[in-house]
Amino acid sequence: MADTTSRLTSLKARITQLADMAGSDREGEARGLAAELSTELDRLMAEPPARPVSAADQQRQAPRAPRDEVERCPVCSLRSFNFQKGSIRESADGSLEAFYRCGSCAHEGWREIK
């Protein structure tokens, strides 16, 4: 955080320098914008640092493979509809889906993870 604070302080000084360099025709606008940006930087420096994501949090957030990695194919009715590893996504309603491919008829489709 100390490094971030020093970088933000440096950025704030450069914004003030930029406002000083603005031409006389738009000097008021430049100073106003510099003041707004400086205020925003002050607010950012006052915020507490974000908590880093721990390994335990990452484990909890990682989607799990479906319980049944092989299901009955909806087309050929054989039990050869196989889960494709690494193919989990979030569906439109917020649940998780897994991609399956049939080893017999090559049918492909997404199934909700139960």
Image: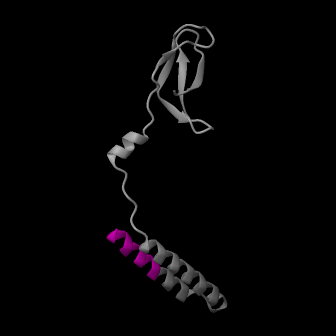
Q: Position of residue 2 (x, y in %)?
A: 32, 71
The image shows residue 12, relative to residue 23, as above or below, that is above
Give the left or right position of residue 34, taking residue 68 as reference. right
**Which residue corresponds to the image point at 40% horizontal and 40% vertical from the top-left?**
60
Q: Residue furthest front?
A: 114
Instruction: Compare residues 66 and 105 and report the one nearer the observer.
Output: 66
Instruction: Compare residues 77 and 67 and report the one nearer the observer.
Output: 67
Task: Locate the N terminus and report the quarter of the image it occupies.
Answer: bottom left
Q: Is residue 2 magenta?
A: yes
Q: Position of residue 79 (x, y in %)?
A: 52, 9
Look at the image and give the residue range highlighted in magenta: 1-13
Q: Which quadrant of the structure image shows residue 105?
A: top right
Q: Is residue 31 magenta?
A: no
Give the left or right position of residue 29, taking residue 97 as reference. right
Give the left or right position of residue 109, taking residue 41 as reference. right
Q: Position of residue 34 (x, y in %)?
A: 55, 82
Tally of numbered tags:
0
The image shows residue 89, relative to residue 57, as above or below, that is above
**Which residue corresponds to the image point at 65% horizontal and 87% vertical from the top-left?**
26
Q: Which quadrant of the structure image shows residue 64?
A: top left
Q: Which quadrant of the structure image shows residue 104?
A: top right
Secondary structure mostly taken by the magenta-highlighted segment of the chain:
helix
Give the image's coloring scheme.
one colour
**Which residue corresponds to the image point at 48% horizontal and 16% vertical from the top-left?**
70
The image shows residue 18, relative to residue 59, as above or below, that is below
Q: Residue furthest right?
A: 25
Instruction: Compare residues 104 and 77 and report the one nearer the observer.
Output: 77
